Amino acid sequence: MEKYIGRTIEMVYMGRNNQITQRTVEVRGVRDGVVQAFCLVKRAPRAFLIANILAVQPVFKGAVS
């Protein structure tokens, strides 16, 4: 996850109660198995356990689909 510091990613995350969500976040840091990020949907800082991140994909701004 360290390679994503300073980048925006989409991730699939298993939260509390085993609820699976998709998040778009800006990764701020990684430490002790926790990703510190800014959630673009909630517009707030969040912490995510690396063990609960199921999938990650970088977001390429300005990409043409």
Image: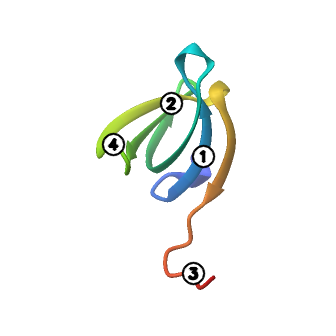
Q: Secondary structure at mark 4?
A: loop
Amino acid type of the residue that numbered disc 3 sits on in the rendered structure: Ala
Location of mark 1 (residue): 11
Amino acid type of the residue that numbered disc 2 sits on in the rendered structure: Phe
Q: Secondary structure at mark 1?
A: strand
Within 10 Å of disc 3 (Cα), the crowding (few <14, some 14-19, many 20+) is: few
Residue drawn 55% across and 55% down? 9
Q: Nearer the viewer, residue 31 or 56?
A: 56
Q: Compare marks 2 and 1 and give the one earlier in the sequence.
A: 1
User: Gap between marks 2 and 1, in whole Å?
Assistant: 10 Å
Amino acid type of the residue that numbered disc 1 sits on in the rendered structure: Met
Location of mark 2 (residue): 48
Within 10 Å of disc 1 (Cα), the crowding (few <14, some 14-19, many 20+) is: some
Q: Compare marks 2 and 4 and give the one earlier in the sequence.
A: 4
Q: Compare marks 4 and 1 and give the one earlier in the sequence.
A: 1
Location of mark 4 (residue): 42
Determine contact: label 2, label 1, CB under 8 Å.
yes
Determine contact: label 4, label 1, CB under 8 Å.
no
Q: Compare marks 3 and 4 and give the one earlier in the sequence.
A: 4
Q: Is residue 28 above or below residue 60?
A: above
Residue drawn 63% across and 82% down? 65
Camera-nearest label, 2 or 4: 4
Q: Residue furthest right?
A: 54
Location of mark 3 (residue): 63
Q: Nearer the viewer, residue 57 or 64?
A: 64
Q: Residue furthest bottom?
A: 64
Determine contact: label 1, label 3, CB under 8 Å.
no
Report whether 52 appears left or right of 46. right
Residue drawn 38% across and 48% down? 41
Q: Is residue 18 above or below residue 30?
A: above
Q: Is residue 14 above or below residue 61?
A: above
Camera-nearest label, 2 or 1: 1
